[in-house]
Amino acid sequence: MKKIISFGAVLGSVPYMAFAEDQIGNILATLIGYLNYIVPALITVAVVYFIWGVISFITSADEEQKKLGRSKIINGLIGLFVIVAFWGIIAVVKNTFGIGNVTGQNITPCVPTAQNNMGADC
């Protein structure tokens, strides 16, 4: 009896599993769309921090200030590496699952005419 109930529960949940795949794809596409705006901003912050470290390293006369500038340079480079690697992982996930951006899509409607086969090429 338990096997029949378990089998019925599995069969009953199959349509929900198929619907969940579509929902996960939409969630991933929306998340990647937002990350495509955030990652360039983070790269900009890391580059500014790196340049700030270079300037503070060059202009400082004190050895302690030079040490701080050197650590800013190293931290900026590590931050840039991590952000660009994260961006690469996002691209791999996007290509693997075949999802694109949901945010920022400009989809123009097509009016069927005789020239475009009554909307077949839209």
Image (cartoon, helix red, strand yellow):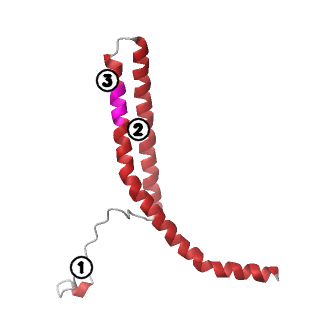
SS at badge 1: loop
Residue at horizontal 42%, vertical 54%?
A: 91
Residue 110 is tagged as: 1
Residue at horizontal 44%, vertical 24%?
A: 71
Q: Callout 2, which amino acid?
A: Leu
Residue holding disc 3: 55
Q: Residues within 10 Å of mark 1 (few under 14, many from 20)?
A: few
- CB under 8 Å between discs 3 and 2: no
First-in-chain label (1 vs 3): 3
Query: Magenta residues?
Result: 47-53
Q: Seen from this angle, which residue lies furthest left?
A: 115
SS at badge 2: helix
Question: Left or right of 87: which side holds 9?
Answer: right
Q: CA distance from mark 1 to mark 3?
A: 54 Å
Residue 51 shown in magenta: yes
Q: CA distance from mark 3 to mark 2?
A: 18 Å
Q: Callout 1, which amino acid?
A: Cys
Question: Left or right of 30: which side holds 12?
Answer: right
Residue 82: percent from left, percent from top: 46, 41
Secondary structure mostly taken by the magenta-highlighted segment of the chain: helix
Q: Callout 3, which amino acid?
A: Ile
